Image: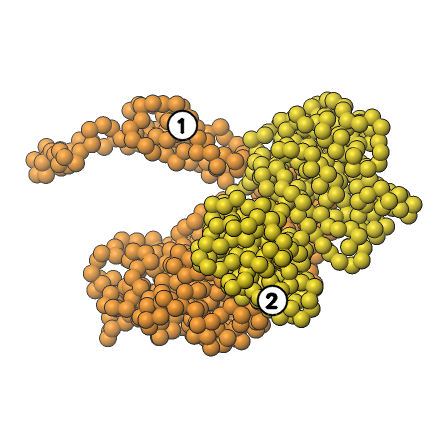
Chain colours: A orange, B yellow
Amino acid sequence: MKSIPEFRSAKWNEPVVMEMGRSGSRGQLFPAPEDEVTEAVGIDLIPAAMQRKDRAALPEITEFEAQRHYLHLSQMTLGMMGVSLFGTCTMKYNSKTAEYATLRPELAEVHPYQHPDTLQGVLEIFDDFNGILQNLSGMDQFIFQAGGGADAAYTMAAVARAYWRDKGKLHQRTEMVTSVQAHPCNPATAAAAGFNVVNLPLEDNGYPSLEALKAAVSEKTALIMINNPDDMGIYNPEIKEWVKVAKDAGALCFYDHANFNGVMGKLSARELGFDACMFMLHKTFGAPKAGGGPAVGAYGCTKELAPYLPCPVVVKHGNSYILDEDRPKSSGKVREFWGNVPQVVRAYAWARAMGADGINLASDISVVANNYMDKKLGEIVGLEISNPKINAHRMEMTRWSLAPLTEETGVSTVDFANRLADFGIDPYWMSHEPWIVAEPFTPEAGELWSKEDIDMWIGVIAQIVQEARTNPEFVKTAPHNQAIAQVKGDAFEDPAKWAMTWRAYKRKVQGSTKVKGVA
Amino acid sequence: MQIGVVVNPFAGLGGAVGLKGTDGPDSVAKALRLGARAKSGERARVALAHLAERVPGAELTLARGEMGEDWCEGLDLSLTITGPTALTGTARDTKEAVRAMRDRDVIVFAGGDGTARDIASVAGGIGILGIPCGVKMHSGVFGVNPRAAGAMMADLVANPKRVDFVEDAEVMDIDEDALRNGVLAPRLYGLARVPISRSLMQAAKGGPRLNSAGALSSAAAEIVAEMDVETLYIIGPGTSAQSVAKAAGQTASTLGVDAMIGRKIVAHDVDDASLLRLAKGRKLRIVLGVTGQQGFLLGRGNQQIGAKLVRRAGREGLMILATEEKLTQLSQPRLLVDTGEPDLDLQLAGFVRVTTGKRRKMMMRIDSC
């Protein structure tokens, strides 16, 4: 077993970049244009009406100072190379090979406004990847416009709205049925698209009962949106029957594949009866993510729903690829253009590198790794698995509860997460709203992490449990080895305490009155 | 902020000896005879020790002797002692101690639901906070454990900005005699002002947590929007149901049952007979909240709404509202009805749509209990 990591973050009293440097400092000094150049192109390249009257407030530092500043800032982060079992996010290594592919000029220098005849290579990648996702889901057409999982869920809501409007039944089909344990983006996006939300509670088996679904669906149901397995890790074995019940009521069925990692290669949304599904390329398909982006939600549906897809859709026409905008029943756009190209290319590279066998094996590994973790975590007194009475094996992640330890020591899951950072480990993911499980945390190993990494992570958990018993205040006041101590959350509720721009900072913090406009 | 502390030295006595609670001196004597040992003092000490650790030298007012003072020995706290000098062993002691602390901002008490009732009945508008020690703790006034109550005290003293107050926390109690006979009968006794922690955490990949007061008021507005002008709407007791009256701009009676027609209250605090009279020749629907933990819908604290009325309304006629938070924290994922008529309870069994917010419903299973 790897030993418990010892770690201490760098801690620089680094100023804001705008406070650094001195008037006149520059990264590069460019020579004035030669006379021949000036003569050829003129002196006032920017029309007078478009020239700003004052100088832009920009940092004035040398290139070397800029490098040092950002090195210092990066030293105060955990980076993305640590052991991060951040559940529901399916953390994966982002291959540098895939990264270099996106940097090739053939990809890096194309622009969506180019004529499609000059984009055939990148369009071929889109269509080829569409084929790979078709194989994994059974759907007939994928699009990559959505800028994330929630955006893809919204795509579903928009497609359902267009579908029911086209059938002349939008006034009647007003409801979206989902589970309280589905990702909150499902009710949120359906509501944003104008549907009323009907939630199903978890019942005795750890998932909603078929009876509840039967009571919920009717001629008013426009669609159902569900995850399976859910974030607790429990697979609903009645899923085929579910889809049948919803279909019998006339509803559309959407499979939110947020938790695809444990079932990839094992099942097909189409075979289970679904009309549409969504994959998150920045999770399951090894493309990077960070702080809300970049991301791509790949949305796929059957031939019957395809006319309602947002456009353009990349399709093969004869021997060439076109951007099909001529789709009169389309639900419109959920985002501009046809998708985040570098992300799609990275995901495509991941899928091609893994191959069908590799993808199949990866889901096995992630389920085995999670069950290994469940066994090990179950040996630590003070932790409790969610739904302890249900003995079904969990899939690729499991929700755990720290409630027994909290009751014993007063150390909460938030305190615990803060302390993890002291070991150079990303604070774990707790739970989506609503918190059904008290003091929750949700680790997810996926296929990336070695047994040594997992053992080390569990070792750190065991150590913090020990600390909670011997010195709870120490845990409650963590982090101690980090660049900053506890984040005071209440500052987020007080606009006087934060600033999104330098201008707002000057106004709020420095009390400067020389502010133009409102930032 | 100024804090007063009152310990009910008899709270929680009954639990260990299976008495379901110790409301009243007879139960206390019986529990003591059975060998029960009060834990409330020790639990209060855990909270006080946590306070002393977080804020050494914190100023505090305590009730005399075993009602407070005794449990602070050796702790780094600056104490003012007040309250009754001779104890009667009844609720009078608690009430007298609270009266002596009326100029404080918050009264922290160690006890259970019975103590909470006593405290709330004399607290006036002062904030109250419970250190959980009772057998029954259904009221929304308790910290999750003694340490959490201590942490809240530390914030009240040293960091009041981290504290918000809710004005309508429910003070519930269960009829102990009924409970000893196997009937769980929670009842709402009043509302109290209670300190709550401001969220100290931002969700890593989401916005702020859903505000339950906001969710409840939007659920109430949703129900008001569904009301027509002719139907009689019977508004059950409790914060949830009565928020519907509030959403219609009406003043509800909180503990009683009100009647609404045309989005206006036409009768306050009415009984079954008056409701039956009002319902003559009208369609009728019943607006209900859900009791926390047990999930009671009918038959607990709202007996004014009799079986006849419920039968006329039917399951379809129930308009239920509760926050998702409350529903997901029920001890069983179901709502219970006990109308006193088993065939009616069976008719009501099945799924209902509970309004949980604006254009949000949750399917809940009704069971007869």
The residue that mark 2 highlights is B311
Residue B40 place in picture, x, y as percent: 79, 39
* Relative vertical location of residue B289 with respect to residue A299 in this rendering, above or below: above
Above or below A331: residue B292: above
Q: Nearer the viewer, residue A67 or B107?
A: B107
On residue A367, the disc is none
Q: Which mark is nearer the camera, 1 or 2?
A: 2
- At label 1, counting other C-alpha atoms closer than 10 Å, the crowd grade (few under 14, some 14-19, many 20 or more) is some
Instruction: Say if labels 1 and 2 share a chain.
Output: no
Expressed as whole percent of the image width and height from the top left, the position of residue B19 reads 83, 51
Q: Chain of mark 2?
A: B
Q: Nearer the viewer, residue B301 or A41?
A: B301
Q: Secondary structure at mark 2?
A: helix
Q: Residue at x 38, y 73 (%)?
A: A302
Say left or right for B71 vs B157.
Answer: right
In the current view of this chain or complex, which residue is farthest to the left? A39
Is A234 above or below relative to B246? below
Under circle 1, the secondary element is helix
Q: Which residue is drawn at the image coordinates 38% and 55% (left, top)?
A: A147
Q: Is the C terminus of chain A in the top left, top right, bottom left or bottom right quadrant?
A: top left
Front residue of A491/A506: it is A491
Q: Position of residue B157 (x, y in %)?
A: 64, 28
Residue linked to disc 1: A508
In this view, the residue in front, A440 or A298, is A440
State the separation of the CA atoms marked 1 and 2: 62 Å
Query: Which chain is home to disc 1?
Result: A
Residue B25 visible to the viewer: yes
Type of amino acid at the residue the image marks with label 1:
Lys
Corner quadrant of residue A518: top left
Q: Can you give x and y, in whole percent of width and height, for residue B102 in the image? A: 68, 27
